[in-house]
Image (spheres, helix red, strand yellow):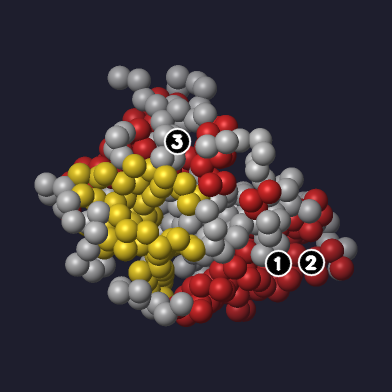
Amino acid sequence: MTENKGNFTLDAAQKYLAIEPEMTTEKLSERLWTISDGKIRTIFIEAQDSVIAFDTFSTPGGARAYKKAVAKAIPNKQIKTIIYSHDHIDHCGFADDLAADAEIIADEICAKVIKIRGSQGQLLATKILKGNKNVITVDGVELTLLNPGPTHGSGNISAYFAEEKLLFSSDTILATAQYGFMPDYHFANFVKFMRGFLDLDWQTFVPGRYGLTDRAGFEKGCDFIEAMQTECQNAFAEFVPIWAYDPMYGYVTNKLSERFGDLEGFEGHVGQMAIRIVHHYLMGGWGGEDTPEPTVLLADQVTL
Ligand SMILES: [Zn+2]
């Protein structure tokens, strides 16, 4: 069997793409579930006659494992809707392997990026959302889908569930410091937009990776990213060689360990986070993506 290969070009990747990871599902309410392979996390919803799945996991094997876990949790109902939280392949690259005939809902910028990317297995959106807030009903379930502006990836959609007092926002704030090197984070307005979610009434936060947290954990996450941005700017003022890992690791660890050293993964991740964040100030972000007017991106170049 040949797997959908995403962006990979080598046959050697097939081995990686085929693995079906063990999934852990947790029921959060009568209709809402969260699922994780130990790294990536998402949610799915039992609707009237079907299942609404957010995202697809990182590989064809991951998508199949997701599908099996959903079938186990909600027997006799099939995934008929997939909502893309953002464009990244590691979260929504393999709808073809999850539910090839599903309706696929995405923000217009996400949809445009996916269209021109042409990644194998990443199906095109069939229902396009525009603007900051969309309240839609899918198979009897009312969904509040929010995109405050560029936070992470292209066309990042968060989901607010008033009934459960719960917010799901993928690859934005984490309950830990395990951020990787933060590719495609849009730092100009990231913390401002994320803090905006605190205007809503919720208690449980479901991130796109690792464990769940509450409001306080989410606020601490916002404070952490903001403090990283502050210290990365201070590093320029203090003439730290900002392009080099060791000096930046030492600098931010010294400045932030008292406040944030208890966050899981702090020690192992702050260095690479700092290297990425200083380049936001050094270079101005990646092209035009880090602007508060994301709709201008690809506006006339790609039609859906
Ligand atoms: Zn992402």
Q: Nearer the viewer, residue 228 or 193?
A: 193
34 lies left or right of 131: left
Look at the numbered disc 1 and give the secondary structure of its residue: helix
Q: Residue at x 45, y 19 (%)?
A: 11
Contact between marks 1 and 2 (CB within 8 A): the answer is yes
Q: Measured from the top left, where is residue 282 in percent x and y?
A: 81, 54
Look at the numbered disc 2 and give the secondary structure of its residue: helix
Q: CA distance from mark 3 to mark 2?
A: 39 Å
Say whether residue 47 is visible.
yes
Q: Which mark is residue 124?
A: 3
Q: Residue at x 54, y 51 (%)?
A: 155
Disc 3 versus disc 1: nearer the observer:
3
On the rendered image, what quadrant is the N terminus found in? top left
Q: Nearer the viewer, residue 122 or 220?
A: 122
Q: CA distance from mark 3 to mark 1?
A: 35 Å
Q: Is residue 287 above or below residue 270?
A: above
Say whether residue 33 is visible.
no
The 10 Å Cα crowd at callout 2, few under 14, some 14 to 19, many 20 or more, is some
Instruction: Say what amino acid the circle numbered 2 marks.
Output: Gln
Instruction: Say what amino acid the circle numbered 3 marks.
Output: Leu
Q: Which residue is mark 2?
A: 233
